[in-house]
Image (cartoon, rainbow, N blue to C red):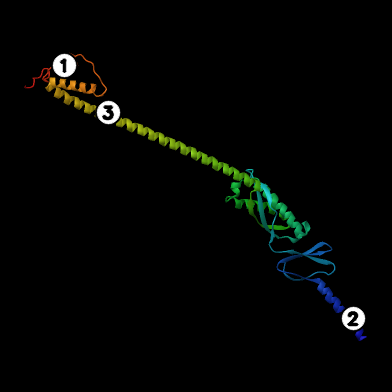
Amino acid sequence: MNSKLAGGFGVLLIILAAVGYLSAFTVSEREQALVLQFGEFKRQVKEPGLHFKIPFVQNVVYYEDRILDLDPPVEPVLLADQKRLLIDTFARYRIEDPLTFFQAVTFETQAQQRLNNFVNAALRSTLGNTTLVDLLSDKRVDLMQTIRSKVQEEATDLGIQIIDVRIRRADLPDETSDSIYQRMQSEREREAAEFRAQGDEQAQQIRSRADREVTVIAAEAQRDAEIIRGEGDQTAIKIYADAFNQDADFYAFYRSLEAYRRALADDNTTLLLSPDSDFFKFFGSIDGGLPGLPKADQ
């Protein structure tokens, strides 16, 4: 009898221990939990520690209470200035309302798929009205805040709080990069040709100015030379005139000698003149005297 009681008491203890074990559950500091009864919500547990539920009737669903990372796929986006970019983004979020989250998506994988769609839609709608210059300027911070707000509007229905949305990288597609490179190369070649043309024009202007200055200097030198030559000739004429006025017969004799010298300068020159020609008027005296001049003493 006593052995039966002891055995029954032992079984009861085992049953109580099993019920107690199945009734207890723990929630860590990184988790939050929902207690469901036949699939219906009963209560939410956010405080870490040991908690209890009705065994076999209620079950517990755990969700992360930490900030989670979202890494959407790279998305091609067309900007307002018709430039196409490959946008690589990332986001951080947390499950703020586990009940809403459970009712909307249930599983975190489904939630991430929905969030990827929200982020891509917000990127397209925001950056589609933005130029590349604005995206690369200080306005980028405001753009990301706008994108985060749009994603948050959609994520609220999932019980999710969007902490941050950022652009990790923005690249040009390969074909666009080649097109931009070719356009930049053409622009640089055009600028180089323009600079060369300007250089040639300036060189031509410098050469023309130098040629003009040479012509002016040569003309001025020629003018000064003619003035000096004229002044010299004038001085020579005056000297000759003064000398000739003092002795007219000598002047006539001198002019005749100059005429002889010029006429007989060429060795091949032959003159056929009459003996009584004026050319020989100064040879009319046998003793070498000059007409009009006293004869030399015998």
Residue at horizontal 49 percent and vertical 39 percent from the top: 196
Could you tell me the amino acid type at mark 1?
Lys
Q: Distance between the residues labelled 3 and 2?
A: 151 Å
Q: Name the residue under label 2.
A: 8
Per the rendering, the mark at residue 226 is 3
Where residue 52 sits, quadrant-wise, is: bottom right
Q: Which of marks 2 and 1 is nearer the N terminus?
A: 2
Q: Mark 1 points at which residue?
A: 281
Residue 236 can be seen in this image? yes
Number of residues whose C-alpha sits closer than 10 Å to that of mark 3, classed few (under 14), some (14–19) or many (20 or more): few
Residue 235 location, x and y as percent?
A: 19, 27
Residue 45 can be seen in this image? no
Query: Pointer 3 and pointer 1: residues touching (CB < 8 Å)?
Result: no
Could you tell me the amino acid type at mark 2?
Gly
Where residue 232 sits, quadrant-wise, is: top left
Which quadrant holds the C terminus? top left
